[in-house]
Image (tube, coloured by chain):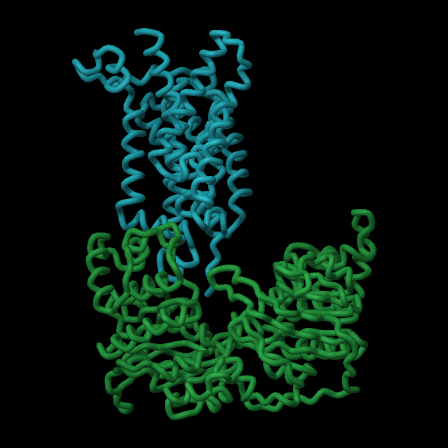
Chain colours: A cyan, B green
């Protein structure tokens, strides 16, 4: 395997958790709810999935535990922001802090444990092709799931009735309520989906990416996923592209540091974020209005009865 | 033409004793209403008469405090619009319930039941558009459409569900006259097809053009049920506005002196979709008098207030002259320094910051005066000032210095008006001073305005409450569609005359009778 091929493979591995978490948050935000707790839900997903995988010696159970942990965390968030119409920014930040702390507690007995790598799939013939073989036909299952999820979310949002309802609720919850659309129910499900995706992304980190658990191992990836949703202008296809740009930047700047190009590494680390700002600027210049942001994003819903 | 309606037949829908209470405010008080199949029934009344509340109850958006709804003689309980639609009700909202970022077809599909696919909507959209002359492109995003086109979406949304009763809430308020005429033709066709229509409006000409029966509400109560074509516009206006003679003011008559506010040829484009442009406004308020501006909401009152206060600047500085200084182009604080004071309509969020304490709220209009120095807040002075306002204007506050949002509407209104009056402004402009305020607070506020003018200040009161204007104003004008009528002494106005000006029929009396 050439170095080039190896770099490409690491980019895919670095991008996948970002993509999964961003897709979940994208659906949540399309319903009009801003959940800033992605980082905390990812940390919980990573800790719980690793703990379950080691205890039962099963990657599948680990993944299930990670998804469940993320969903439970988001259910707590849903209770606060939907049930009590609390401030979403404050509740989301609290969820992140809670998740980081709780994951440390759950993961403490498992520090130092290791898991075997998850076997990549192998298609005889195709997987052995030079360069593209491993890249396209020899990844682990998560990668294909994340791509399928992108397509599914895009299809759901644009082609299904339920997706249309979800978008309408996110666009204007007062009108949606006046039309009799189920604002609370759709938002609750969207928040749960976001939590489950964050949990899955966390599980990928601890079971595939590092294969061990350490406190704070999410290292800000939840925040990058949040930025990605804005970068993608709330569109799944752009989230895929954005996730791979961010993933590539993360990996390449490591290699750039190793190669000692003479560019400060801090500057390289900042490139994806500068790109986000630039992209947002260009997008808003072109449309002259807030691009793609759901109209009711972040606003608590209290119906008038 | 309308289908023949037999008055003895069973009504399609009947409301019995509907009441709705919001805290101290009784928005609907035992209202009865019956509509026959195929009938176009008007619901008439001024703003705040309770029309919108009543139809929201009928459509299941809000729950009544008391009363029942009979659908074809059977009592029904509507807990959501979905149930109302299932019965056969459709509603076109005054402020559209549309989703700006979605396309026309998506906006229609989202309001329909799940068995409608986007493709079906698209093809049906074509049929309905043709049948009723409602042209629309299915794939345009709503934010690119005009108000008339947006309304067509709302109407088609309803029509696709084959409604038995279509409710339209002030449908022409955002339409051009041509778009409105287009709408009437559509409604006539619908009625001929047997669909009943509840038409909510305060525009008399339209109601006389469309409807054979009308229910009139005033102050949340049922007033009369009439045939609008058999009654004169003057009669109907009197029923809507009320006949009670306003209380005669006690105390010394006001003696007006020099001009404190002069508005000359003030024109301004409308601020947005629901805005109203101002058209050549001329107005003089003298020291020592109260000038009243009557009119139905949305005819340019907010825009006029914004132009007087400096929230929106005029093109020419001399369009607004305060205390002899041209200040059409300067901001609100500069106008305050000339001795002017302003109280906007919305007390929470505009006149006062909801989560700030009353003392902090004094800064909003007193920042240039005694509560700050060199950019620093004099907190004790602010607290003293707040206490003085609370004491002088009988503000009932939960504790010494509560957040503004903790006060009831009436008490907060006393505070924001008191905050300006306590400065003894040379000019006070106040928009809807007693809107949604209980009777006791309203009396106190009106007395304070009268006293202020008695002390030699000029006061401009913009109000929808005619009784209030007849009680306090020395001279009055009526605003209609951004134009101001002649400013006449209050004893030269009759309620009928004001009502006709408010409805815009004063100039076109002959035309109205010809319909």
Residue drawn at (49%, 48%), measured in percent from left and top? A81
Q: Quadrant of the N terminus of chain A?
A: top left
Decide which of B420, A63 is in the foreground and name it.
Answer: B420
Q: Residue A7's x, y, as percent?
A: 37, 13
The residue located at (75%, 71%) in the rendering is: B260
**Residue B115 appears in the picture as rendered:** no
Q: Residue furthest left?
A: A125
Residue name at image x 25 percent, y 69 percent: B132
Q: Along the horizontal axis of the image, is B423 left or right of A254?
A: right
Q: Position of residue B205 (x, y in %)?
A: 41, 82
In the rendered structure, the answer to whether residue A126 lies left or right of residue B354 reads left
Residue at 40% across / 53% down in the picture? A184
Nearest the camera: B145 or B484? Answer: B484
Q: Is residue B224 above or below residue B62?
A: below
- Tell me if I can see residue B70 in this picture: yes
Quarter assignment of residue B187:
bottom left
Check the image and report above or below for A172 versus B256. Answer: above
Does residue B385 lie above or below B247 as drawn? above
Quarter of the rendering containing residue B287: bottom right
Q: Position of residue B345 (x, y in %)?
A: 61, 67
Frontmost residue, B293 versus A37: B293
Q: How many marks?
A: 0
Q: Give left or right: position of B459 versus B81.
A: right
Residue A281 lies, in percent from the top left, at 49, 36
């Amino acid at each position: 395997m050439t170095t080039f091929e190896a770099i490409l493979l690491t980019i895919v591995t670095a991008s996948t958790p970002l993509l999964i978490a961003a897709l979940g948050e994208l659906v949540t935000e399309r319903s009009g709810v801003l959940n800033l707790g992605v980082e905390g839900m990812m940390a919980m997903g990573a800790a719980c999935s690793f703990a379950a995988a080691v205890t039962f010696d099963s990657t599948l159970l680990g993944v299930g535990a990670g998804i469940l942990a993320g969903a439970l965390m988001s259910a707590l968030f849903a209770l606060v922001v939907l049930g009590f119409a609390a401030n979403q920014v404050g509740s989301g930040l609290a969820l992140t802090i809670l998740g980081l702390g709780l994951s440390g507690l759950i993961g403490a007995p498992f520090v130092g444990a290791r898991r075997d790598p998850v076997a990549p799939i192998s298609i005889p013939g195709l997987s052995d092709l030079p360069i593209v073989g491993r890249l396209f036909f020899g990844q682990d299952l998560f990668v294909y799931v994340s791509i399928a999820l992108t397509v599914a979310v895009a299809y759901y949002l644009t082609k299904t009735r339920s997706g249309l309802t979800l978008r309408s609720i996110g666009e204007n919850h007062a009108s949606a309520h006046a039309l009799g659309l189920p604002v609370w129910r759709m938002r609750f499900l969207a928040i749960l989906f976001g939590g489950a995706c964050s949990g899955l992304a966390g599980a990928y980190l601890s079971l595939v990416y590092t294969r061990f658990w350490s406190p704070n191992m999410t290292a800000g990836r939840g925040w990058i996923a949040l930025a990605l949703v804005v970068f993608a202008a709330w569109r799944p296809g752009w989230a895929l592209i954005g996730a791979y740009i961010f993933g590539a930047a993360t990996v390449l700047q490591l290699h750039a540091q190793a190669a000692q190009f003479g560019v400060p590494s801090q500057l390289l680390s900042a490139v994806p974020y500068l790109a986000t700002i630039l992209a947002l600027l260009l997008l808003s210049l072109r449309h002259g209005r807030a691009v793609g942001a759901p109209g009711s994003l972040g606003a608590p819903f209290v119906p008038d009865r | 033409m309308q289908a023949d309606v037999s008055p003895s037949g069973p009504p399609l829908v009947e409301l019995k004793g509907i009441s709705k209470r919001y805290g101290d405010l009784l928005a609907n008080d035992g209202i009865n209403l019956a509509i026959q199949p195929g009938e176009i029934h008007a619901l008439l009344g001024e703003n705040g008469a309770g029309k919108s509340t009543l139809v929201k109850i009928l459509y299941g958006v809000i729950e009544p405090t008391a009363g029942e709804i009979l659908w074809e003689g059977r009592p029904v309980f509507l807990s959501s619009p979905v149930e109302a639609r299932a019965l056969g009700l459709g509603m076109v909202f005054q402020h559209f319930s549309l989703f700006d970022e979605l396309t026309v077809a998506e906006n229609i599909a989202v309001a329909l039941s799940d068995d409608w696919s986007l493709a079906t909507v698209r093809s049906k959209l074509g049929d309905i558009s043709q049948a009723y002359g409602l042209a629309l492109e299915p794939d345009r995003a709503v934010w690119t459409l005009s108000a008339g086109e947006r309304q067509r979406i709302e109407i088609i949304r309803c029509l696709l569900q084959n409604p038995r009763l279509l409710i339209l809430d002030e449908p022409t308020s955002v339409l051009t006259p041509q778009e409105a005429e287009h709408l009437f033709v559509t409604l006539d066709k619908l009625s001929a097809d047997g669909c009943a229509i509840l038409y909510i409006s305060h525009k008399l000409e339209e109601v006389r053009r469309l409807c054979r029966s009308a229910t009139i509400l005033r102050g949340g109560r049922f007033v009369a049920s009439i045939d609008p074509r058999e009654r004169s516009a003057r009669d109907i206006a009197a029923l809507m506005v009320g006949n009670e003679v306003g209380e005669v003011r006690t105390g010394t008559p006001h003696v007006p002196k020099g001009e404190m506010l002069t508005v000359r040829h003030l024109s301004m484009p409308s601020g947005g979709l629901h805005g109203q442009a101002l058209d050549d406004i001329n107005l003089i308020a003298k020291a020592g008098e109260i000038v009243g501006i009557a009119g139905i909401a949305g005819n340019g009152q907010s825009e006029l207030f914004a132009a007087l206060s400096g929230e929106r600047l005029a093109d020419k500085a001399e369009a607004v002259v305060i205390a002899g200084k041209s200040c059409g182009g300067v901001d609100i604080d500069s106008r305050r320094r000339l001795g002017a004071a302003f109280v906007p309509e919305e007390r929470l969020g505009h006149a006062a910051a909801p989560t700030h304490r009353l003392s902090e709220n004094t800064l909003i209009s007193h920042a240039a005066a005694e509560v700050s120095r060199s950019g620093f807040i004099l907190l004790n002075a602010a607290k003293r000032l707040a206490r003085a306002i609370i004491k002088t204007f009988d503000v009932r506050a939960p504790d010494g210095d509560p957040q503004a949002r903790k006060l009831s509407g009436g008490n907060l209104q006393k505070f924001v008006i008191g905050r300006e009056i306590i400065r003894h402004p040379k000019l006070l402009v106040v928009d809807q001073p007693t809107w949604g305020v209980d009777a006791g607070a309203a009396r106190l506020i009106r007395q304070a305005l009268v006293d202020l003018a008695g002390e030699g200040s000029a006061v401009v009161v913009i109000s929808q409450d005619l009784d209030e204007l007849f009680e306090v104003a020395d001279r009055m004008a009526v605003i209609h569609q951004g134009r101001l009528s002649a400013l006449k002494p209050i004893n030269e106005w009759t309620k009928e005359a004001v009502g006709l000006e408010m409805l815009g029929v004063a100039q076109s009396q002959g035309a109205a009778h010809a319909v």
